[in-house]
Amino acid sequence: MESITNMLGPIATGKLGHALIGLLILIVGLFIVKLLAGVFKKILGKIGFLQKHELASPIASLVKAVLTIFVLMAVLQHFGLTDVLDPLKDMVSKFTAAIPNIIGAGVIGYAGWIIAKIVSSLVGAGLGKVDQNIAERTGNENVKVSKFGSAFVFGAILLPIIVAALGVLNIPAISEPASAMIEKLMAAVPNIIGASIILLVAYFVARFVVFMLSGLLEGMKINDMPEKIGMQSVFNDGFTPTKLIGGAIMFFSMLTASTAAVNVLGIDVISTIFAKVLEFGGGILVGGLILIIGNILSSLAYNKLIDSGSTGLANIARIAILGLVLAMGLKAMGLADNIVNMAFGFTLGAVAIAAALAFGLGGKDAAKTVADRWANKIDD
């Protein structure tokens, strides 16, 4: 300031000179800020971690903004606007006081991330052999225990370090809720591990059972049964009865294991929702299975009666079987129980009344003969 004042000489004492000095401070300050920000951005761009996560530009912009605030403070102070400077000075002082904490938290977080990355990579490499054994035994290469183990170890190491980094920041509004959340998450880790073990064990056991049962069913020539009962259009080479049975076993096994896993987690809301979904889904599956079996039986009966030349009886049998299994299926699904009961009861009642009227009115002579025979037997 003194050098600029001496250089301007008498002009600096006037209002115009005072304004020119303020303008010169602003121009020179912004030029220096731009120069320093560019150098700082180039330095940050050479750091691999910041470049990989695209953090160099945001940090450089933050530094540029802080330096610009200092230049503006110098300009305002030159013009004597101290009242405007007080809140700005307070903000800058708080920010500069927090810089060591920010740097410390950043160093702790970065170091924790590096450690978690290294340890999780080692765990993933160690579990790679387990993946090979699982693929050889089950024939399924999609199951990757190494990925799950690596991610679990990474999170287990990084979460406590994040809590420590937030504590260094000394911002209770952020650190206290985050610490409480992570503590609850760490407390739930044993339940999560238990639920995962249940699912993994159930999966491998079900795969083994399906493998053994598939060989047994193929030896019994179950895949030839659709052709014998006239259901070859439902199945093909990619969808055989053996695969259908194996898929059903896998589904119900994992469904049961999922129920146990949810109960182990101890989350009441999820357990209640899952129980309701399981109850409703089980009824739908049982009802659908009844309808499928009923359709197969009705088709089988229809084809056999058609072959014997009883076309009318074949249609009656088919309709009767479909009506019965439809009522049973809807009952098992729990859909409109009262309507199903009433419809089935009215149908049977109508059939009974129709048979009685046909026998009593349409064939009254035959009915009289039968009734007389019964009366004679009673008298004797």
Image (cartoon, grey):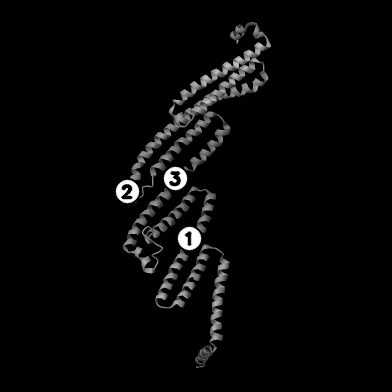
Q: For the residues marked 1 and 2, what is the alpha-carbon distance in whole angstroms? A: 33 Å
Residue 278 x/y as whole percent: 50, 56
Asked if labels 2 and 1 touch by Cβ distance under 8 angstroms, the answer is: no
| Residue 274: image location, x then y, percent | 51, 53
User: Quick one: label 1 or label 2, which is nearer the N terminus?
Assistant: 2
Q: Which residue is mark 3?
A: 193
Q: Residue furthest left?
A: 219
Whole-angstrom CA distance, mark 2 to mark 3, is 25 Å
- Quick check: 100 above or below 130? above
Up-down relation of residue 317 to residue 137 (above or below): below
Viewer-nearest residue: 48 or 12: 12
Q: Amino acid at mark 1?
A: Leu
Label 2 element class: helix
Among numbered discs 2 and 3, the one appearing first in the sequence: 2
Residue at 57% in and 19% down: 30
Q: Residue at x 36, y 41 (%)?
A: 127
Left or right: where does residue 376 sit relative to residue 300?
Answer: right
The front one of 378 and 113 is: 113
The residue at 54%/75% (across/down) is 348
Q: Position of residue 15 (x, y in %)?
A: 68, 12
Marking on residue 136: 2
Could you tell me the amino acid type at mark 2? Glu
Q: Which residue is mark 1?
A: 285
